[in-house]
């Protein structure tokens, strides 16, 4: 080994050395540098003396310390290659060499480091072998194979990984023809053939070409191929490329795709609305039921839209408030009954659930919504409740009717029995005639009672009654005409304020009975201190045509008689013609037409009845 003599601090020869040179002591501190060294590293301000080499160059390999330590022991080794940037920020490569630094006593006091610019060499064919080693190491780690094709010599080279992917033995020698043959016939073989042709004829590279091969063992395998042409002095000399087995990735992707299809099929066929919203309450997934509910053919018409785009602002604001509560508190809403109103005004009842979507940090990044349409169930529930109510009312009517029948018929029967007993024991002819007259009157009363009961039965059992549209103003005129004599005799006045074209849906005979009963009752129970005045008016209210009949009669104490006002044979005034059957029959007729009646009254001032005629059939 050539021993370099120790330099003195006064020597200026070091500064004039033709190559960038640095002297470092055994503590790795820079002691002397040449001008070339200073020029090379002045921009990075890395020429300071008495500073550690590894402090000034932090990117140097830590292994170089071991190399320099061996140099300090008289066993120099190559340091290696270091990449840096020149004054123009261009990438340059330097090869570092070292040798022991001796003093006059031939003792090693440090190391002499020289660097050589090998940028051109790195980029030349001479350095391709070094890079090839790096590529081999990278290929082993990433499982990406390489291949090279020498155009001039028609030689194709595969690395071991490429051979393993093709399932050929290590000693296998490929050529361009059988390499193409390994690609599956059809699209894959045509695609690689076209890529090779365009690379050689047009200089066009290809990458990420997903193709299928058939290996030497007959297995089909998905691979990713890439390649590019290599030129020397403007002339094509070869092709190089990569080759990767992606079968596991394809299998995983297919499995994921199948799972997604399965999940999509599942949620699309669920009989509930399913959707996913992001943190801004925009829908990012919807199923078929949700599309059907919103009246769209494709999810794309909904995705990206918020509730403010799909529902009235009030409903959307309420839904947004729920979304934020679920995402902020992380507490789901389960089976909450909600009323959903669409932009067209249609109302739908739902059992809705909202569940927070959490990331791996436990933070909500959206919600999953599930809604079950219970509109039909609610309608059935309402219908069932109405049936129960009707059954309850009918049951009460039946009990009441049974009580009336039992009471009235028993009274008539007892009266007949008593009079017959009197008649049987009576000898006086005049008294007998009187008893017979009483029997005749009782018989007439019984017939009247039976007629009344028959009317009630007829009303409550006639389920096929047909309602017709009737001009109410004209019908009042007809009843007025019919009752003219009765009204004149009782000094009663009727004021018809009903609009001339106002119509109600009613059974004609029932409407006659209703008008007749309420008008005659108003006259019958007039205040004797003033002339009777009856006012009729009409209006429309939420699906009903409302007839209002008011009078200035005696009035009714509703606190006392309100609950039994429409009861059978219930009377509230001492009047010789009061029988207590008119209002009962009238109320049954109104009920039979799915209507209702309301009353307000004040004793001494008069009474007002409101009859609600249902506008539906």
Image (spheres, grey):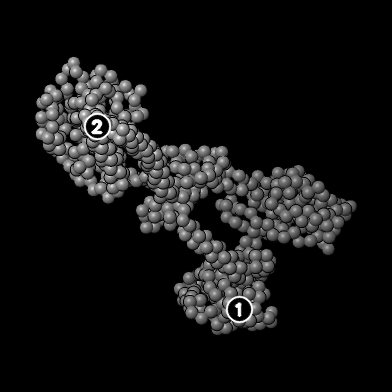
Snapshot quadrant of residue 393? top left
Q: Nearer the viewer, residue 127 or 426?
A: 426
The secondary element bearing badge 2 is classed as helix
What x and y, as percent, mark residue 192? Answer: 51, 76
- In the figure, 362 relative to 86: above or below? above
Residue reaching furthest top?
529
What x and y, as percent, mark residue 601? Answer: 28, 23
Does residue 583 appear in the picture of this structure?
no
Does residue 173 appear in the picture of this structure?
yes
Residue reaching furthest right?
105
Question: How crowded is the residue under tag 1: few (<14 C-alpha within 10 Å), some, or many (20+)?
Answer: few
**What is the spatial separation of the Cα atoms under label 2 and label 1, in whole angstroms?**
124 Å
Q: Nearer the viewer, residue 363 or 436?
A: 436
Q: Nearer the viewer, residue 222 or 241?
A: 222
Q: Residue at x 83, y 63 (%)?
A: 1
For mark 2, what is the residue?
A: 432
- In the figure, 242 relative to 59: above or below? below
Give the number of the disc on residue 131: none
The secondary element bearing badge 1 is classed as loop
Taking 246 as reference, is 528 left or right?
Answer: left
What x and y, as percent, mark residue 496? Answer: 14, 30
Q: Residue at x 62, y 77 (%)?
A: 166
Taking 336 as reference, is 21 left or right?
Answer: right
Q: Nearer the viewer, residue 549 or 317?
A: 549
- In the figure, 252 relative to 32: above or below? below
Mark 2 touching mark 1, by CB under 8 A? no
For mark 1, what is the residue?
A: 219
What x and y, as percent, mark residue 508? Answer: 19, 43
- In the figure, 447 relative to 359: above or below? above
């Amino acid at each position: 080994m050539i021993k370099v003599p120790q330099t003195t601090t006064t020597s200026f020869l070091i500064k004039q050395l033709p190559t960038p040179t640095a002297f470092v002591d055994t503590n790795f501190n820079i002691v002397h540098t040449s001008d070339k060294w200073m020029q090379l590293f002045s921009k990075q301000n890395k020429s300071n003396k008495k500073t550690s080499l590894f402090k000034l160059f932090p990117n140097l390999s830590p292994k170089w310390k071991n190399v320099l330590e061996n140099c300090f022991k008289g066993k120099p080794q190559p340091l290696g290659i270091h990449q840096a940037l020149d004054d123009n920020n261009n990438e340059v490569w330097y090869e570092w060499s070292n040798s022991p630094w001796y003093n006059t006593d031939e003792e090693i006091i440090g190391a002499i480091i020289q660097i050589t610019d090998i940028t051109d060499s790195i980029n030349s064919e001479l350095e391709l072998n070094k890079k090839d080693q790096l590529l081999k190491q990278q290929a082993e780690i990433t499982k990406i194979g390489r291949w090279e094709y020498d155009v001039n010599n028609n030689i194709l080279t595969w690395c071991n990984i490429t051979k393993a992917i093709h399932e050929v033995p290590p000693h296998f020698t490929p050529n361009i023809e059988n390499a193409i043959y390994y690609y599956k016939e059809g699209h894959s073989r045509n695609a690689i053939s076209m890529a090779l042709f365009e690379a050689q004829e047009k200089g066009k590279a290809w990458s990420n070409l997903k193709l299928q091969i058939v290996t030497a063992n007959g297995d089909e395998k998905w691979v990713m191929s890439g390649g590019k042409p290599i030129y020397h002095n403007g002339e094509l000399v070869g092709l190089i490329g990569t080759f990767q087995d992606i079968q596991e990735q394809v299998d995983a992707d297919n499995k994921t795709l199948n799972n997604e299809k399965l999940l999509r099929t599942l949620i699309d066929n669920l009989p509930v609305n399913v959707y996913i919203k992001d943190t801004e309450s925009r829908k990012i997934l919807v199923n078929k039921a949700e599309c059907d509910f919103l009246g769209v053919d494709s999810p794309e018409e909904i995705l990206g839209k918020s509730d403010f785009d799909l529902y009235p602002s009030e409903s959307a604001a309420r839904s947004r408030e729920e979304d934020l509560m679920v995402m902020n508190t992380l507490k789901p809403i389960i089976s909450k009954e909600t009323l959903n109103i669409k932009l067209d005004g249609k109302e739908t009842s739902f059992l809705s659930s909202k569940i927070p979507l959490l990331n791996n940090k436990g933070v909500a990044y959206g919600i999953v919504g599930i809604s079950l349409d219970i509109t039909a169930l609610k309608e059935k529930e309402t219908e069932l409740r109405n049936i129960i109510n009707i059954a309850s009312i009918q049951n009460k009517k039946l009990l009441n009717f049974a009580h009336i029948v039992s009471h009235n018929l028993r009274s008539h029967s007892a009266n007949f029995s008593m009079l017959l007993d009197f008649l049987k024991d009576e000898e006086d002819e005049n008294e007998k005639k009187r008893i017979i007259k009483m029997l005749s009157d009782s018989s007439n009363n019984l017939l009247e009672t039976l007629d009344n009961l028959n009317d009630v039965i007829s009303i409550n059992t006639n389920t096929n009654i047909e309602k017709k549209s009737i001009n109410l103003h004209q019908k009042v005129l007809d009843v007025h005409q019919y009752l003219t004599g009765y009204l004149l005799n009782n000094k009663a006045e009727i004021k018809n304020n009903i609009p001339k074209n106002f119509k109600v849906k009613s059974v004609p005979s029932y409407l006659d009975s209703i008008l007749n009963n309420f008008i005659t009752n108003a006259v019958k129970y007039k205040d004797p201190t003033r002339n009777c005045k009856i006012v009729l008016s009409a209006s429309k209210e939420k699906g009903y045509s409302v007839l209002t009949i008011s009078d200035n009669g005696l009035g009714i104490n509703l606190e006392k008689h309100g609950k039994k006002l429409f009861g059978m044979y219930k009377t509230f005034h001492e009047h010789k013609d009061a029988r207590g059957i008119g209002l009962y029959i009238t109320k049954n007729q109104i009920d039979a037409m799915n209507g209702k009646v309301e009353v307000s009254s004040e004793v001494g001032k008069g009474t007002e009845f409101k009859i609600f005629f249902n506008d539906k059939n």
